[in-house]
Image: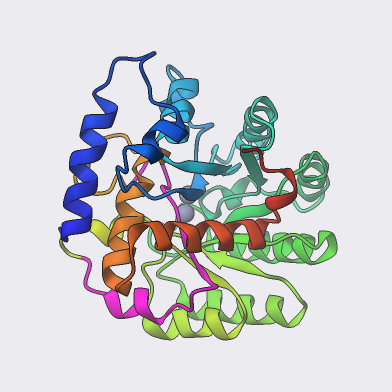
Amino acid sequence: MGDGVRNLHRNLQLHLRREPGAALGRAQMAAQDYGIPDFIDSHAHLADAAFAGDRDEVIERARITGARSIVCIGSGSGATDVLAAARESAALASRFPGYAFFSAGIHPHDASGFDAATTIGALQEIVAAGAVAIGECGLDYHYDNSPRLEQRRAFAEQLALARDLAKPVIVHTRDAEDDTRAMMEEAAQAGVLGVLHCFTGTRALAEAAINAGWYISFSGIVTFKKWSDDDIIRLVPDDRILAESDSPYLAPVPHRGKRNEPAWVSFTVARLADARGVTAEAMGETVSANARRLFKLAASETS
Ligand SMILES: [Zn+2]
Ligand SMILES: [Zn+2]
């Protein structure tokens, strides 16, 4: 851990140990100069059952720890009801207007439950309720939970929907770089913008995304010991880098292995800052500005 991350850890521990109800207000926190960056969590699965017991507390902790907004990812509910997560994320976001936002899409794992005749129409209705993005969608040839042909079909349909509705896409890709790259570049040609989320790909894929005008989002993986791609963190231009929790998965060090939550994006932001040689506060401002631009959050954000 760099010094920035170590200090942040200590300060967050101090902060989170306070009694419930004694939570500091933002102004007080700033006055005490804890040095915790503000940020936007661009990717959180808050509709996941892992948060069933304490969803509102998780969101409150995120808020007091510096999350200015959270994008709730509406996909990944399983192949039997591929849009359940999208509906739940829409409902969740509606309870925190101007703070929690939602996306809607079909995860590549669930592509076998995608029915071209019905799914896109139903998805379009949910998006019309105010989704800020389509996704996460994409290709996962690592787990191959759905046949690859069906993954490509579902991804292509969602890219086309994104083009038609002028929404950005949130893309998941694993062990599928060639196909992801080809489909991303074709979509970009058609005017679709997007983000490669939880980036763990090659430098070549990162360069292709940047050249296509797309964004790259980093998760807690960048805090893991085995992470060795700081050059890719540095490769991404200031106006294209995002940070995310991908909660409940991928908790950053020092919470690795626990259920992840948006508050801990602070550690990821601090690690990105270390890699790029900027302050955590500046890094937080950068990822927040980028999330606002890509997802058009600014108009509806509170505080
Ligand atoms: Zn993903
Ligand atoms: Zn995800």
Residue 224, picture quadrant:
bottom left
Q: Which residues are magenta?
A: 227-249
x 67%, y 56%: residue: 295
- State the residue at coordinates (53%, 43%): 68
Left/right placement of residue 177 relative to residue 278 reads right
Residue closest to the far front:
31
Is 243 in the magenta?
yes
Most common secondary structure along the magenta stretch: loop
Counting labels gives 0
- In this rendering, the answer to whether 11 lies above or below 112 is above
Residue at point 56% right, 65% down?
195
For the N terminus, the image quarter is bottom left
Looking at the image, is 36 positioned above or below residue 141?
above
Picture quadrant of residue 281: bottom left
- The x and y percentages for residue 130 are 77, 42
Q: Height in image: 167 above or below 85? A: below
Is 76 in front, or is 6?
A: 6
Q: Is residue 30 left or right of residue 34?
A: right
Of residue 240 and residue 146, the one placed in the foreground of this image is 240
Q: Is residue 34 magenta?
A: no
**Residue 162: image x %, image y %?**
75, 62
